[in-house]
Structures are given as structure tokens and as C-alpha cells.
Image (cartoon, helix red, strand yellow):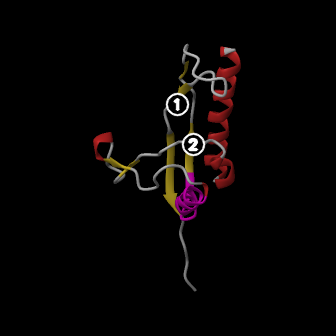
Amino acid sequence: MSEDVRQQIEEIVNRETRAWGTQDVELRMTVFHHDMVWPWPRTPQSHNPMDWAIPWGRYNYERWKSGWQELFDPHRLARNQREIKKIEISKVEMTALMPRSGYAFQPNVAAWRLRWVWAH
């Protein structure tokens, strides 16, 4: 069972990496759980989670899709180097619908650049 869960987590992480690399918002949306809340740094310099906010609220497909599209549109991905360093799986069974939970630690080495927009 835990190897199956490990493979599922790895597939989700790899799918997210592909979504970033291709700037595919639809693919990006497939990695989020419907009960998820996504905290955001208030500024690019806000590395301390004490300074983070929750501007998008609880998962809402249209709101989150729009937010990711707004991030992707004016930027291009300059670098997307990722490697899974650790996958941890809970030993506790939660429910029949969600028997195990886990997370993956993956240092995000992505860099973004603003796209140049030329006005005519």
C-alpha cells in the first residue's frame, strides 16, 4: 500500500513540474485538493511564513485558475530544476476514502522572468 501511495505522490509532483514547465494552468489545477488553502508571501522578499497571507481563500476552481493564469501570462519560466528529496507517508489510516496521507519535499528551483510586451 505505501509504495502505491509513494508512486501517487511522485506522479502528482511530476505533474506539477510539467505544469510549471509548460505553463499549463489546466494541468496545474489537477494537483490541488478541494479542501486546500494556499498561503502566499506578501512580497517576493517575504520568506518568513509569519508574513504570509491567504488572498485566494479556500480552493475554488475558477478563482484559483484565474490567479494562476494571471501569474503565468506576464512571465516566462527561465529555469525549472526540481528533484524530489523526500516522500513521507503517514502510518495512520484516516478514512476509507483517504487511507493515507503524505507529502513530498522538493526544493523549488524555479526562476521567472517578465515577458516583454511591445505596444504598437
Classify mark 1: helix, strand or loop.
loop
Which residue type does callout 1 highlight? Gln
Marker disc for residue 106: 1
**Residue 105 coordinates in the image, percent (x, y):** 51, 27
Q: Does the magenta stretch mainly form a helix, a strand or a loop?
A: helix
| Residue at which label 2 appears | 80
**Residue 48 coordinates in the image, percent (x, y):** 30, 40
Q: Is residue 44 above or below residue 108?
A: below
Quadrant including the N terminus? top right
Identify which residue, 17 or 119, lies in the foreground: 17
**Residue 11 coordinates in the image, percent (x, y):** 69, 31
Which residue type does callout 2 highlight? Asn
Asked if one can make out residue 48 in the rendered structure from this viewpoint, the answer is no
- Looking at the image, which residue is at 34% across and 54% down? 43
Furthest residue toward front = 96
The first of marks 2 and 1 along the sequence is 2
| Magenta-colored span | 62-77
**Residue 22 coordinates in the image, percent (x, y):** 67, 51
Membership of 85 in magenta stretch: no
Membership of 73 in magenta stretch: yes
Quadrant including the C terminus? bottom right
107 lies left or right of 95: left
Classify mark 2: helix, strand or loop.
strand
- Looking at the image, which residue is at 54% across and 42% down? 35
